[in-house]
């Protein structure tokens, strides 16, 4: 009998859920609800439990969460609420649900869903914030927070490429910054492939990729935001 994995992708603006069979086919319809504001742990736990209960039967859970996650404890989550810093999310949910559970950074989960498992692969999520995950031959190098790294003029990647920046400067300038970031990150990581996902990846003009230096366009892939859910199944296939 195929195990059912309930995958949940927690974002700064929405929370998505779907159950997958082991062969990757969907066992339920995809559900999306708004992220509450303020997104405190108490409010989010209540909402997550209601969402999980509404999905029916499942065997195990996989959750992508927008923070560093160390041994099931969240650190940061700057786009949610300060109280998430040091919150034992895995233990709290396991105590309430009694089901096998894996939790990882949301960009790590999306990366697991995107990578080919060969060479240096970098996954970026463009949404409320700027998420990142780095893999070497399919193995995750954990706790990478490129978004919080100073990029230019004392501003971080997230400062210049997150949703607030997009709203402030408009799509055209934001797209040009994305092209600069692709080139800058190549100099830093010498990646074989970079995957651009998240809700705002759909705004990237593919024609702009052709002007990237050093044939970088061949190393860039725009991927579906649903990989943040599909990667939850991959999370159970790896030694995370």
Image (spheres, rainbow, N blue to C red):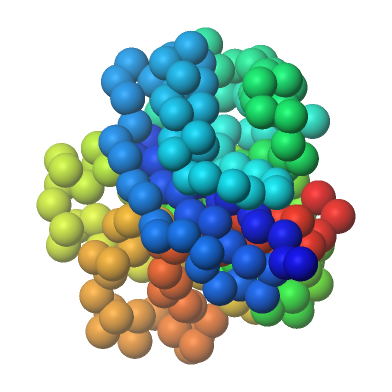
Residue at 41% x, 74% y is: 222
Residue 15, x across and y down, in percent: 40, 41
Left or right: 100, with 33 as reference point: right
Left or right: 62, with 47 as reference point: right
Pick whichever, 239 or 43, lies toward us: 43
Q: Quadrant of residue 2?
A: bottom right
Instruction: Answer whether residue 209 is visible to the viewer in this image.
Output: yes
Left or right: 8, with 15 as reference point: right
Residue 187, x across and y down, in percent: 59, 66
Pick whichever, 43 or 160, lies toward us: 43
Instruction: Answer whether residue 162 is visible to the viewer in this image.
Output: no
Residue at 31% x, 40% y is: 33
Q: Residue furthest right?
A: 239
Pick whichever, 13 or 50, lies toward us: 50
Residue at 78% x, 62% y is: 237
**Vertical order, 175 against 219 (above or below):** above
Q: Quadrant of residue 75?
A: top right
Residue 41, x across and y down, in percent: 50, 16
**Vertical order, 143 against 59 (above or below):** above
Residue 178, x across and y down, in percent: 35, 61
Pick whichever, 169 or 16, lies toward us: 16
Residue at 40% x, 60% y is: 29
């Amino acid at each position: 009998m195929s195990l059912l994995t309930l995958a949940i992708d927690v974002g700064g603006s929405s929370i998505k859920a779907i159950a997958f069979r082991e062969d990757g086919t969907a066992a339920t319809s995809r559900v999306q609800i708004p992220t509450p504001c303020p997104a405190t742990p108490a409010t989010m736990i209540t909402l997550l439990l209601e969402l999980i209960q509404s999905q029916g039967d499942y065997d195990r859970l996989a959750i992508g969460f927008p923070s560093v996650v160390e041994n099931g404890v969240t650190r940061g989550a700057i786009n949610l609420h300060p109280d998430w810093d040091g919150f034992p999310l895995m233990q709290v949910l396991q105590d309430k649900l009694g089901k096998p559970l894996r939790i990882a950074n949301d960009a790590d989960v999306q990366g697991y869903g995107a990578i080919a498992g060969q060479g240096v692969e970098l996954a970026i999520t463009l949404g409320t914030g700027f998420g990142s995950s780095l893999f070497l031959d399919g193995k995750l190098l954990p706790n990478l927070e490129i978004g919080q790294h100073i990029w230019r003029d004392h501003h971080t990647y997230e400062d210049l490429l997150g949703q607030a920046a997009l709203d402030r400067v408009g799509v055209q300038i934001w797209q040009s910054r994305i092209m600069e970031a692709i080139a800058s990150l190549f100099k830093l990581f010498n990646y074989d492939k970079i995957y651009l996902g998240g809700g705002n990846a759909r705004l990237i003009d593919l024609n702009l990729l052709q002007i990237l230096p050093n044939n970088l366009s061949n190393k860039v892939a725009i991927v579906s935001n649903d990989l943040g859910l599909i990667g939850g199944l991959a999370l159970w296939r790896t030694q995370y």
